[in-house]
Image: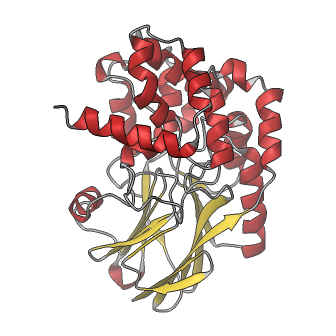
Amino acid sequence: MIIAATLNGERIEHADQCVLNPELRTEPLPERLYRKSHPAPVSAKPEGSIDRIRQKLVRDEIFGLGSPMRIAVLSDIHGNLPALEAVAADLDRLSPDLVFVAGDFQNRGPNPREVTSFVYQSGWTILRGNHEDYVIWQSQNFRTDDSADYYNWLPARWTAELTRDSMEWVKGLPIATRLAGPNERSIIIAHGSPRSNDEGFFPTTPQTKAAEMIGDNPPALLCVGHSHLPLVRWINSTLLVNVGSVGFPFDGDRRASYGILNLGHDRWEVDIRRVEYAMERVVEEFDRVNFYQGAGPLSHLIRRELESARPHLTPFEYLFGLKIRAGNISISEAVETYLSMPQEQIETEFIRVFRRVRSPS
């Protein structure tokens, strides 16, 4: 089978690795920079809750694929309603046969209730990402004594308050789904990987690690989100497609990102689409819904993520988390200092601290 990809309008046949991140530094940033939140210590999670959720939510749903067929995959909307509406309008023009939302439609953005209602009523197939898990934990009155983690969890706690009426539906969503593809080769759509919604594929992920994440009986095509970085890459015999993020891209391009998979008679074509939307409407929503008050001080970093199309929650944690926990700086002072830093300084300081933490002398 022939597989081709269209990235930024450029057609690529049998791409070994294509990353839609033109501003990525020559020295790749650690993938930890792109991880979006900080899971609580295992001992601090509601006992057994997420284990019970995962046991019943990893399931196969077989969709038989005809030819030709067009499949749309959206991921990481994160409560950004204007971006979702713009992508939905683009889908109306393209008329795909199937639409999948690969998780993380909640948390981070100002309209989690409206986005949840939108996808619930859409008729699309919805998966559960790690941020839905975070919201579930917060709906169970999860608490932490860690002073920095208290603020890390506030956006999810605020989201949980707004989406309680949909919580049971969200708990019932799978983390991956399998489609019966041509030539007896399957297609898997997942949030992070087929085995977990809390790990992801990054430009820096080694081939051996990526193959392990894909697991036994690898699909012909694996379509994911989670990292917020559009990516097309071969992992042995599997074409890995990361569709990026609808609501919070992290590749420096503020436009919403999603994927279209076109199945011909003997050919897959992958198109990573970028869609303009009215970002100023999202900024207005931050004020209208009292997001800064409800989601706490880190809401200002989330706004910077939106406007810069770069990750900021994780670098902030690395640069200021220990200082906040030690009482050397207040959360407000830390946020103000971070927001005054230019992007290049943030990345340089993050790499320095990351290496020190990972390789202590």
Q: Quadrant of the C terminus?
A: top left
Percent across and percent down for residue 138 are 51, 21
Percent across and percent down for residue 274 are 67, 66
Does residue 199 appear anywhere in the picture? no
Seen in the picture, residue 327 relative to 31 is either above or below; the reply is above
Does residue 298 appear anywhere in the picture? yes
Q: Residue furthest bottom?
A: 265
Q: Residue at x 69, y 45 (%)?
A: 307
Q: Is residue 282 left or right of residue 307?
A: right
Q: Residue furthest left?
A: 361
Q: Residue at x 28, y 68 (%)?
A: 218
Q: Residue at x 57, y 86 (%)?
A: 68
Percent across and percent down for residue 286 are 76, 31
- The picture quadrant where one finds residue 8 is bottom right
Q: Which of 41 and 128 lies nearest the eye of the viewer? A: 41
Q: Quadrant of the N terminus?
A: bottom left
